[in-house]
Amino acid sequence: MGHTRRQRKPLNSAGISLIEVMIAVAIMSLGMLGFIAAFSQITKGVKHAKGRTLAANPLTLEKLEVMRRVPYHKLMVSTATVTETIAGYGDITYDVAAYPEETVVVGDIPYIRRVLVEKVQSVGNAFQGLASSSDDLGVKRLRVYTLWMEEGAWKMYEASTIYTNPNLKPLRGVIQGTVTGLANVQVTALQDPAYYGISATGGGYAFSVPAGSYTLRANLIGYFPSYSGLLNVPSGATVTQDFTLSAKGYGTVTGSVWLTPRLLVSKVVVSTTHAGCDQEFIELFNPSTWTWTIASATQTAVIDVVTVKNAGGAIEVLDLTYPNGVIASKGFYLVANKDTVYVNGSSRTADAYLDSNNCTSKLDGFQAGGAGIRWVAGGEYIDRLSWSNSGVGNNSTLTEGTAVSVPGGMYPEDQLARRIEPAVFNTTYGPAYDTNVNSNDFQSYLSPGFNVPYTPNTSAEGTKSVVSGFPAWGAVISADDGLSSAVQAAWTGTPSFSLASVATGTWQVGLTSGTYYLPVTNVTVTNAVTTAVRNAATQPAWDAAGYNVTQLTSTITSGFISGTIRNSAQAALSGVVVSASGVTATSDATGKYTLTLATGTHTVDANPSSAVGCNNSYVSVSSGGWLAETGRITTGVDFTLSGGGGIKGRITNNGTDPLVGVAVIASSDGNERGFASSDSAGYFEIRNISTGSYNVIPQIDTGESVSPSSPTVSLTGSGVTVWSATFTLTGSPGTITGTVKTSAGASIKTGVLLVATTGSISAGPPTNNSSLRSGGLIYYTASSLSDGTYDLEVRGG
């Protein structure tokens, strides 16, 4: 039998080895992994883009459009809000009551949608949010936030829009005139100070206003303001009003300004002998308006008393016993080496002492030395006094400025006493003069003989008036007269000031140094006469008769806005509430008010309708753009309030049952003058509108109807409230809600079309054509969401 033998291939013949196969597989795997990674990133990019697109439209932008379709006054302002920090986006504030957050699932992505509706005002080129309780200026800002989770982190899309009141019409009339011989006179419509004109060379002025009734004020610094009567400005008309101004008389206000912020060392005697016992004492004085604590009730020191001998001596903290631990305002405190000291035939019981029978002094005579007080906590010095031995040897730590030079050092009975004012010492007033220079602040009584010149005071000796303090160099002084300009106190020596060209009358003068401030009221200025403050008639009055000085005792970081409230006859109105940025004040018997405000620009509201104590006999007026500066008074923010009244009515759905939250406006000459919303019983009251004729118009949606539609009412006097009508509103919308499910009970996640009508629907929805749209039946449609739920808005019926 024959066989065929197979031949082996030579070892060097062509082929693929196992190693080559493995390398090829590795290369292909790397390529496949790269493709998978790229595909994953592409998928993520598409998903992220999808998430943002859905957040923007329809969830955010369409929500804004839906809200803008609501009539202006029916779009409720957010009154209950919370603020939350979103990482990467900052703080957001949103509504939790009128517009609670919604969870919406679109494209299998759960979104959270939040809304904020706020009143705003225009400030410069931007809009500034207002409190929900503020008056509505005709502008609201709508914000919608849409949030979703992406790779473990919150993402957010935000959009906002401005919604203006369409019932506020453009300017319709013109006021013009001439101010005799004066340029730069501001003529203001006091019912709305946002409308004004400035007289040009020759005195002519003109400005536009909405149709209505106005009282004008012509004002120029240095002149008494002039007021017009109540002018009626019809739509499209030009009304002329001329003015003549009279120059004001003026006087000058003078005084000096001081600070009293710290406790002071007031007297020192290093040695005086009684019955063979060496005595020494340090007197303290409190020029401030508050009580200082030296030691607690448990004998624990709060403030240390320290002494030193010579430049190289160690500062020693006195280990004291404290029978009295406090020092009253403008009172004294005696620290001694023993419990009772005898000076000039009188005994003084020390408020704090080293030892009841100690006859050894800490401050030896015939050498330099010093004394001071400092906080136990932190060791910061409150006050220091140092004296030298013929100009040398004083301790620098206890020296303020320049030490008191004592030839040969302090002898027995020598005394250093703090002055009451520059270069003056006496015992009538409190020793408060304090320039931080020992040689300026203290009077030296050296080698007087066998008696200490002045007996020390303890807490038992009572208090003394202060006529100086630390000089408030450069302090700012201003008055609310509207004529004078702020001045500064002197920068050296006595901190005196002279405020010139203050209008005749009675004013408030504000004095400020850094964060310290004091208002002095009832400052009466007479023509060509200088008035010094403080005096017996000012509030507060002088501390010491004949001393026209002011100590600033309160700290402040605020500014002030002031003005006067008058009625149409220019008589002062008292008790009128004035507010700005949440701060309120009330006008006094002269019509004046002063608001203390944070620094910045403010809108001032006179008799705001939202305020407790609003006077319904007068209208509400606002004026914006007023600047409050730290410690200064911005003057001339005056208001004239015309007589106001109210309009009442009721909103029902059938003449009997109430409708809640329906907005109603009062319109005159096509311009909105006031609005209100119906309460839980359907009643509304439009308050604080001026006398005249008005159309009362409920604000309704498209498809709604109301009867009567716009009745006319007349307000004939201030404080009068008239009845308009009982309105019947029909066709108000309602909402049908539910969930679309399969026969097995599962929610249908794809959009399902829902149709509602007052008639009947056959097997399927009718075709949307011209015949359907012109027919008598109305069809309402909506689509279900991805969780199967739906909201279908329909008209009542």
Image (cartoon, rainbow, N blue to C red):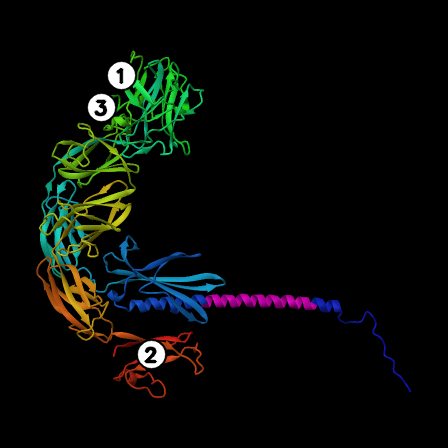
Which mark, by number, is residue 316?
none
- CA neighbours of label 2 inside 10 A, class few (<14), some (14 to 19), many (20+): some
Count neighbours of disc 1 (C-alpha within 10 A) and say few if under 14, some if 14 to 19, many if 20 or more: few
Residue positioned most to the right: 1
N-terminal-most mark, 1 or 3: 1
Q: Which comes before the other along the chain, label 2 or label 1?
A: 1
Disc 2 and disc 3 in contact, CB within 8 angstroms: no
Which residue sits at x=29%, y=67%?
A: 68
The range drawn in magenta is 24-50
Q: Is 491 contained in the magenta span?
A: no
Q: What residue type is disc 1 on?
A: Gly
Q: Is residue 43 magenta?
A: yes
Q: Nearer the viewer, mark 2 or mark 1?
A: 1
Q: Which mark is residue 428?
A: 3
Most frequent secondary structure within the magenta stretch: helix
The foreground one among 234 and 696 is 696
Q: Is residue 659 visible?
A: yes
Q: Residue at x 23, y 74 (%)?
A: 704
Q: Residues within 10 Å of mark 3 (few under 14, many from 20)?
A: few
Q: CA distance from mark 2 to mark 1?
A: 106 Å
Q: Of tags 1 and 3, which is closer to the observer?
A: 1
User: Mark 3 falls on what kind of element?
Assistant: loop
Q: Is residue 139 above or below residue 388?
A: below
Q: Residue at x 39, y 75 (%)?
A: 789
**Residue 276: image x %, image y %?**
35, 13
> Disc 1 on helix, strand or loop?
loop
Amino acid bearing label 2: Thr
Q: Residue furthest top?
A: 449
The type of residue carrying mark 3 is Thr
Which dot, 2 or 3, sits closer to the camera?
A: 3
